[in-house]
Amino acid sequence: MPTQSTPRRTSTARSASAKKAAATRRRSASTRRTRSTARSTARTTGQRAKAEATGLQAVVQQAERAVLIPVGATLTARDNVVETVKPFVQPDTARREVERLQRRVRTNLRKFERRGNTARNRAERRVKRTRTQIERELRQRRNQVQRAVRRNRRELERDFRGVRRDVGRNFDRLTSDVTPLS
């Protein structure tokens, strides 16, 4: 079976198709540039118009905010009141809501009582500890003073006995040295 071969293109044919492709590329680039220029012109015009309108819009927006903020705050307050009152409209839901609030109050009261009890116990322990420390320190100081007084008393008595003995000896010596005058 004979194979079919594709005819080879000549250099002239290749050159012609390259020139056509280059021309197509140039046209596409030119079209892109034209579109880009048109887009940027439109964008610039739009921005200028927007900038002119922005000054006026800013004033309008501030005026709107001055009106809308109080309206929104009022509506929020109304919603809060409606939500607060809603459970109390029907007798069943009102009873349930009151019971729920009473449970919450009882629970909080128990918590407060426990916390107060804990604080009282801590304070009592602190006072007791401080009192014990002060009593111990006073006992130690009293004992030190008593020991010092005993020690000084003993030394004083010892010195006094020694002085009395010396005075007695000196008296005896003097009396023996002195001859009777009679």
Image (tube, rainbow, N blue to C red):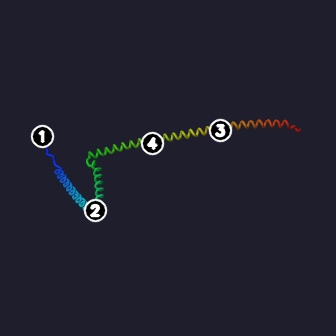
The label nearer to you, 1 versus 4, is 1
Q: Position of residue 119 (x, y in %)?
A: 45, 42
Q: Which residue is mark 2?
A: 51
Q: Mark 4 or mark 3: name the one nearer the start of the chain.
A: 4
Callouts 2 and 1 close, C-beta under 8 Å = no
Secondary structure under badge 2? helix
Q: Which residue is mark 1?
A: 3
Mark 1 → mark 4, Cα distance in angstroms: 107 Å
Mark 2 → mark 3, Cα distance in angstroms: 99 Å
Mark 2 → mark 4, Cα distance in angstroms: 67 Å
Q: Mark 2 or mark 3: name the one nearer the start of the chain.
A: 2
At label 1, counting other C-alpha atoms closer than 10 Å, the crowd grade (few under 14, some 14-19, many 20 or more) is few
Mark 2 → mark 1, Cα distance in angstroms: 72 Å
Q: Is residue 158 left or right of residue 139?
A: right
* Farthest left residue in view: 1
At label 4, counting other C-alpha atoms closer than 10 Å, the crowd grade (few under 14, some 14-19, many 20 or more) is few
Q: Mark 2 or mark 1: name the one nearer the start of the chain.
A: 1
In this orientation, which residue lies closer to the viewer: 35 or 137?
Answer: 35
Disc 3 marks a residue whose amino acid type is Ala
- Residue at image location 64% in from the left, 37% down from the top: 147
- Residue at image location 59% in from the left, 38% down from the top: 140
In this orientation, which residue lies closer to the viewer: 176 or 99?
Answer: 176
Q: Which residue is mark 3?
A: 148
At label 3, counting other C-alpha atoms closer than 10 Å, the crowd grade (few under 14, some 14-19, many 20 or more) is few
- Number of the label disc, if any, that sits on residue 119: 4
